[in-house]
Amino acid sequence: QVQLVESGGGLVQAGGSLRLSCAASGSIFSINNMGWYRQAPGKQRELVAVVSNGGSTNYAGSVKGRFTISRDNAKNTVHLQMNSLKPEETAVYYCYSNVVSTLGTVNQYWGQGTQVTVSS
């Protein structure tokens, strides 16, 4: 089994910054893509950012230039640095990882979600 534990959410004023972290543990041989989605009340879950195991990144257009995703392969962690936050980015943020197990299978795992609230 694999567990993803997120941290770093909270309340911040508009224009402020937060850094989210997500640590994967368990039966992990390697991790392919790691990333973050978010879901605001009444809206569909949307991709925020993704990083490959080689370090290639991709961002939603709305966050480019303000958010930075990074990972530490040795620690199986992924981070999301969020700057210049906007009230409309209030949402639950979920991390995910595409994990290659020690048996060679590939499965996607999700964190429990962390609340980010941006006040105006």
Image (tube, rainbow, N blue to C red):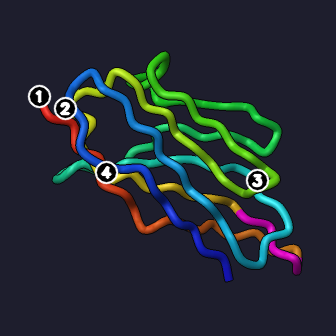
Q: Secondary structure at mark 2?
A: helix
Question: Alpha-carbon distance for marks 1 and 4?
Answer: 19 Å
Q: Amino acid at mark 2?
A: Pro
Read off the residue under disc 4.
39
- The vertical placement of 69 against 44, above or below, is above
Q: Residue at 44%, 48% (x, y): give it.
A: 37
Q: Identify the mark nearer the N-term, 1 or 2.
A: 2
Q: Identify the mark nearer the N-term, 3 or 4.
A: 3
Q: Amino acid at mark 4?
A: Gln
Label annotation for residue 32: 3
Q: Secondary structure at mark 3?
A: strand
Please state the horizontal and vertical placement of residue 116, each as a whole percent of the image: 29, 47
Please state the horizontal and vertical placement of residue 41, each as a whole percent of the image: 18, 52
**Which span of residues is magenta-colored?**
99-103
Q: Secondary structure at mark 4?
A: strand
Label annotation for residue 120: 1
